[in-house]
């Protein structure tokens, strides 16, 4: 029994000597294995406390002040690193290491580490820069080179980016400082995307514009403001080159939106019989007369009883042109039905189509009310509407596809004279005051034609109480209308 006790004491004594043996001196303090274990334990406790404080600041304190996700991550990371440094210094002081005597050693070690780990130091400084300047934040959609994804985490050495396919990529911070970065989420999440479209030569550019804008307005993720634009970018080798420019507020879905727009564009072009070209080669024959005989071979005719039978269909009947109905009119056709725009040039019609927009009204919805400001006029693309007076409760008229209404209130700046509601699901093409003003400023000739057309409606103007013989006896209707348009639209 005594032998066992002696052996146990000798083992503990040996372990004690091992743990208390001086390894080296640091800051005037003998460093032993036991001291190292003590430093490690206290460091782990300090790290746990710092992490709890950091998470509390990020998930509770900063949330209460309304900080976004990226700002919360940046602020909590900086505070965490500062607390970690102070915590480690406190641990060293707690175990009795004199910090003042470590400055020379730390300086020497820092120089050595700087040369040996130049890239690591560069990434460290870059990480600090990113956290303080915040060119990117957690949650931003960024593009660096060929990498496109969402920032998930920013640390001192690297940044974690999650691609649109869900793959996590660890990027050194140095790349975000030295390279150009596209931050799709910086300040404003709205961004524009371009859809290039090639159209066959000979196509009607107005119809192409109408088709591309119609496709853009059918995609629900495309923003109505800024309005979609169609750019005629050039004349290619085999095609007319167009670009559809639209704006979205969800850049992460840009590839899905582009795909949806391509489907819609193809459908709109097909509906209007607009061809998408393919590469072509022209074949030139130097001696066409040598091949003439091949194309002039007389057809064989069977003779029966000395009579030559009549050739059926030898004289093809001339096909009658198919007249268009309002159901298959293009938007350009509909705009030309409005007397104010029937003499517009192709450029003016195209810009009018660009400035306007489509709006859907379900059955029974009121489009405008009696005495409301006249801030837009409408063309019915499909469906029908009812015109009635709310004050008298009387039915006035029904308007169908291809007809228009509200132009007099818009052009003269007067309240609506009747209320209008949809009788079925109805699609309207809307031109509001701002859009018409932009067009009139660009095309003074269009303003002159509108003045001329309005001046022919002197009786209607008098019925509306706008042009009276007493007050306007010295003016003719043309001059009066021109002055009123100039005042209303600042042209």
Image (cartoon, rainbow, N blue to C red):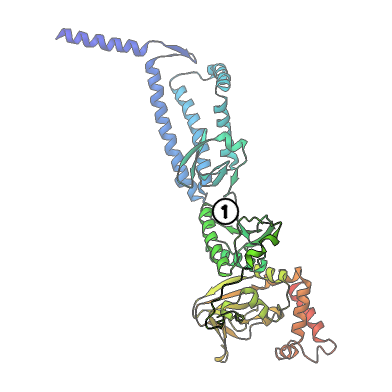
Front-lying residue, 419 or 195: 195
Category of crowding for the residue at label 1, using alpha-carbon neighbours closer than 10 angstroms: few (below 14), some (14–19), many (at least 20): some
Q: Quadrant of residue 246?
A: bottom right
Q: Residue at x 57, y 25 (%)?
A: 118
The residue shown at (33%, 10%) is 17
Q: Is residue 185 above or below residue 92?
A: below
Foreground of the two, 265 or 173 = 265
Residue where numbered disc 1 is placed: 189
Q: Residue at x 28, y 10 (%)?
A: 13
Tell me, yes or no, if residue 256 can be seen here. Answer: yes
Which residue is at the front of the view, 58 or 149?
149
Residue visible at 78% across and 77% down in the picture: 448
Q: In the rendered view, does 238 fall on the left or right side of 185?
A: right
Q: Is residue 168 left or right of residue 13?
A: right
Residue 189: image x %, image y %? 57, 53
| Quadrant showing the N terminus | top left
Between residue 387 and residue 211, name the one nearer to us. 211
Quarter of the image for residue 228 reads: bottom right
């Amino acid at each position: 029994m005594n032998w066992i006790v002696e052996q146990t004491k000798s083992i503990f004594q040996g372990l004690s000597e091992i743990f208390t043996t001086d390894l080296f001196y640091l800051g005037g303090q003998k460093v032993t294995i036991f001291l190292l274990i003590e430093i490690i334990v206290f460091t782990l406790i300090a790290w746990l406390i710092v992490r709890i404080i950091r998470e509390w600041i990020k998930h509770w304190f900063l949330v209460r002040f309304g900080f976004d996700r990226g700002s919360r991550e940046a602020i909590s990371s900086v505070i965490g690193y500062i607390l970690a440094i102070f915590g480690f210094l406190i641990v060293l002081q707690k175990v009795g290491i004199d910090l003042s005597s470590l400055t020379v050693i730390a300086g020497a070690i820092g120089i050595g580490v700087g040369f040996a780990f130049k890239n690591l130091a560069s990434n460290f400084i870059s990480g600090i820069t990113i956290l303080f300047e915040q060119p990117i934040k957690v949650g931003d959609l960024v593009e660096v080179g060929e990498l496109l994804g969402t920032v998930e985490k920013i640390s001192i050495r690297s940044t974690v980016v999650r691609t649109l396919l869900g793959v996590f990529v660890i990027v050194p911070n140095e790349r975000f400082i030295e390279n150009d970065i596209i931050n799709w989420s910086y300040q404003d999440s709205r961004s524009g995307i371009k859809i290039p479209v090639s159209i066959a030569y000979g196509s009607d550019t107005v119809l192409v514009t109408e088709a591309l804008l119609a496709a853009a307005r059918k995609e629900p993720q495309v923003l109505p403001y800024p309005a979609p634009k169609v750019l005629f970018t050039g004349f290619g080798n085999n095609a007319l080159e167009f670009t559809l420019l639209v704006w979205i507020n969800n850049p992460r879905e840009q590839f899905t939106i582009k795909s949806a727009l391509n489907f819609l564009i193809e459908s709109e072009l097909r509906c209007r019989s607009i061809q998408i070209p393919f590469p072509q080669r022209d074949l030139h024959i130097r001696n066409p007369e040598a091949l003439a005989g091949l194309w002039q071979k007389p057809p064989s005719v069977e003779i029966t009883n000395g009579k030559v039978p009549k050739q059926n269909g030898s004289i093809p009947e001339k096909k009658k042109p198919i007249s268009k109905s309002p159901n298959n009119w293009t938007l350009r056709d509909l705009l030309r039905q409005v007397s104010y725009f029937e003499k517009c040039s192709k450029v003016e019609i195209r810009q009018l189509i660009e400035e306007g927009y489509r709006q859907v009204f379900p059955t029974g919805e009121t489009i405008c009310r009696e005495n409301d400001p006249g801030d837009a006029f409408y063309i019915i693309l499909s469906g029908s509407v009812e015109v009635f007076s709310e004050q008298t409760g009387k039915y006035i008229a029904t308007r169908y596809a291809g007809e228009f209404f509200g132009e007099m209130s818009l052009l003269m700046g007067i309240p609506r004279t009747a209320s209008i509601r949809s009788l079925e699901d109805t699609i309207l093409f809307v031109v509001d005051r701002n859009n018409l003003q932009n067009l009139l400023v660009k095309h003074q000739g269009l303003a002159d034609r509108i003045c001329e057309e309005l001046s022919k409606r002197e009786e209607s103007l008098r019925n509306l109480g706008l042009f009276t013989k007493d007050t306007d006896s010295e003016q003719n209707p043309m001059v009066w209308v021109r002055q009123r348009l100039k005042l209303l639209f600042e042209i």
